Image (cartoon, grey):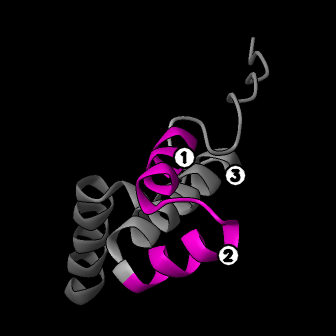
Amino acid sequence: MTDRYTIDSQLEHLQSKYIGTGHADTTKWEWLVNQHCDSYCSYMGHFDLLNYFAVAENESKARLKFNLMKKMLQPCGPPMDKPDES
């Protein structure tokens, strides 16, 4: 029984430390934003993938990095309004 409590506490610690792991109250919008931002960071961090996108879009690598950085601000649009729980 003690293993279960240590696993739960480790999971809670992991979720509090890393935003992308989510938690029980993570909304679909928050999860999608994390996925998009992680993808854009990965694209910028992998040199060959960035070169591929630059050739495919006929843009310079600097312009492509700039566009990816702009997309990271609100990759899924503004957040949805939460319904009132009153």
* The disc label shown at residue 67, or none: 1
Front tag of 1 and 2? 2
- Residue 86 x, y percent position in the rendering: 75, 11
- In the image, which is nearer the foreground, mark 3 or mark 2? 2
Badge 2 element: helix
Closest to the camera, between mark 3 and mark 1, is 1
| Pointer 3 residue | 28
Residue 37, x across and y down, in percent:
49, 55
In this figure, which residue is indicated by the disc labeled 2?
A: 56
Residue pictured at 69% horizontal, 28% vertical: 78
Marks 3/1: CA–CA distance: 24 Å
User: Alpha-carbon neighbours of circle 2 within 10 Å: few (<14), some, or many (≥20)?
Assistant: few
* Mark 3 neighbour class, 10 Å CA radius: few under 14, some 14 to 19, many 20 or more: few
Provide residue 2's location: percent of width, then percent of height.
Answer: 20, 84
Front position in the image: 20 or 51 = 51
In which quadrant of the rendered view does residue 41 lie?
bottom left
Element type at marker 1? Answer: helix
Mark nearer the N terminus (1 vs 2): 2
Query: N-terminal of the two: label 3 or label 2?
Result: 3
Residue span colored magenta: 48-71
Quarter of the figure with residue 6: bottom left
Q: Is residue 10 above or below residue 59?
A: below
The secondary structure that dominates the magenta segment is helix
Q: Amino acid at mark 1?
A: Asn
Q: Relative to 81, does residue 43 appear above or below in the rendering?
A: below
